[in-house]
Amino acid sequence: MEIPAISSTPFDQNPIDYTDDFSDVRGQEHVKRAIEVAAAGGHNLIMVGPPGSGKTMLARRIPSIIPPMSFEESIQTTKIYSVTGLLRDGIPLIRRRPFRSPHHTISDIGLIGGGSIPKPGEVSLAHNGVLFLDELAEFGKSALEVLRQPLEDKEVTITRSQISLTFPASFMLVAAMNPCPCGYLGDSFHDCSCSLTNIQKYRSRISGPMLDRIDIHIEVPPMKYRDLSNEKEGESSSKIAGRVNFARKVQQERFMKSRGIFCNANMSHRFIRKYCQTDSAGRELLENVVDKLGMSARAHDRILKVARTIADMDGKFSVGTEHLSEAIQYRSLDRNYFT
């Protein structure tokens, strides 16, 4: 499938009415902040927390704060849905960013695409939108491993004996999982019934290379009664989207002459060196953290990308120590859960 050049300018200024709004979410302010940063830079995100902490509720509201699709993005998405027969009657053009949430029992072909007559999978159906993988550790190990390639290349190539097809797969990955098999490890309200062996086996389902490709890791604690009973609405999606759009416009100007790059998450190593410069204090901070946690080069680059996004949201030209510090906090799961 040919991928045309993409403009980042929305073709329809009429706002899309999303049923799910962040105003419905009570509490979890630090999680909403992480989600805002992820949306502002197009970063992949994983949420780890016990059942009922609101991970799915938060994830379903992410499309409401991502900038509207451009005309070219809408054409791309519509083509994919037309090929798979999922284009609804009476909707000639898809304007709403896709939100795909496949079940963890999905096959490799269902997730990535393929078949005797190759068709796009969920990663392509989520193109220009969000792919939400709930209960990430329950997905098949092979499915998670084949997901690494589209996360890196933003496309999927399916080869058969007489044909080779390439489908676009540029999506924002949002994942959620429990901290252990029973879900209550570290929960002050419930006792965890899992053995250390079971916990380690459960966590090992997410490989290091897979985790490296997820920019932001955030812990979602259980909700407290005072948050649930609070009648005051949370901040609306429209307000959050305003700040996200501001950061995205900064990135559009930065990458105006760079084909195929529209947000910080897509920066190559060359652009990271160019746009993520920091001072000596920031370099020292980053060196200490990377050496202490034994992070990979890819994780190091992800920290710099997220820090660049935070600086853009702050209206700052350079990446400061405070931006790096927040970005480093979003890699805490490297140490707390997976090592």
Image (tube, helix red, strand yellow):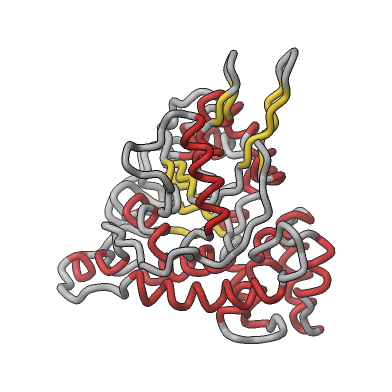
Residue at the spot 30% in from the left edge and 62% down from the top edge: 17
**How far from the left and from the top, in percent, is residue 271?**
80, 67
Left or right? Give the position of 236 relative to 203. left
278 and 246: which one is in front? Answer: 246
**How far from the left and from the top, in percent, is residue 244?**
49, 72
* Tally of numbered discs: 0
In the rendered image, the vertical position of residue 177 relative to residue 272, given as above or below:
above
184 and 58: which one is in front? Answer: 58
Left or right? Give the position of 59 relative to 305. left
In the rendered image, the vertical position of residue 290 relative to residue 99, given as above or below:
below
Res 145 visible: yes
**How far from the left and from the top, in percent, is residue 175?**
48, 47
Residue at the spot 79% in from the left edge and 78% down from the top edge: 277
Left or right? Give the position of 104 relative to 18. right
Residue at the spot 56% in from the left edge and 79% down from the top edge: 313
In the rendered image, the vertical position of residue 139 relative to residue 28, given as above or below:
above
Residue at the spot 72% in from the left edge and 24% down from the top edge: 164
Left or right? Give the position of 244 relative to 23. right
Q: Answer with the quarter of the image where residue 234 lies.
A: bottom left
**How far from the left and from the top, in percent, is residue 47?**
46, 53
Quadrant in the picture for the N terminus = top right
